[in-house]
Amino acid sequence: MDERKKNIDELLSDLGVLEEGPIGVELKETGKEPKSKGPKEVLEEFLVGLLLRLDPAHYVEVRQEETLFKVEVKGGDLGRFIGKEGKTLRAVEYLAGVVLAKTFGGAYRVQLDAAGYRKRREEKIRRLAQEAAETVIRTGKPLPLPPMRPSERRLVHMLLKEHPQVTTESQGEGEERHVVVYPRGGASGTPAEEA
């Protein structure tokens, strides 16, 4: 176990995550000052370094939309990279955000995707919300949905906000927090607009 932790720490240190100073490797050429890297370059360098260690067939495409970096991971075994229920994908996204925050403060956000996982997941949440609304209308009984991440709960609330026959409310704590769909007028309190 200690050997594995040591290897993970070494890997993260190699990628610049555990270092105290700014991340980046300075290449010095004779007679030239080293270029300071922008956020896109820092992000690409971190992700390429990490992905090469996971599967050399992976590569990234990075698009910047103002302060949001949309990163698409391609090549290699993307199912393994995404992980069970997207956990590996979210973990790498979190680490990429930490790297940018450490270097540039909180000015930038990272959204990571692989093999269209995010779009498929959003479609699944949309279908789940619609099916839940139909079930609640048919039965007249509240229906709790499975636990979801804040962004997914927010999507359900937004999708059903204007629905004439149902309303939503978030309940639970931490990883057990979930949305309950109620018949309109049957909620135990004010519907939660926030996740």
Image (cartoon, grey):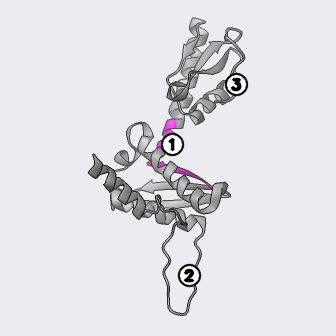
Label 1 secondary element: helix
Q: Which mark is residue 118?
A: 1
Q: Is residue 129 magenta?
A: no
Residue 160 lies, in percent from the top left, at 66, 24
* Three-letter amino acid code at the position of disc 3: Lys
Q: Which residue is mark 3?
A: 161
Q: Tag 2: residue type?
A: Pro
Check disc 3 and report its element: helix, strand or loop. loop
Measured in 3D between alpha carbons, the distance from the residue under mark 3 to the one under mark 2, in whole angstroms, is 52 Å
**Mark closest to the chain's N terminus, 1 or 2:** 2
Mark 3 crowd level (few <14, some 14–19, many ≥20, 10 Å Cα): some
Q: Residue furthest bottom?
A: 31
Element at label 2: loop
First to last magenta residue range: 108-121
Between disc 3 and disc 2, the foreground one is: 2
What residue did someone put label 2 on?
A: 34
For image coordinates 36% across by 62% down, the residue present is 52
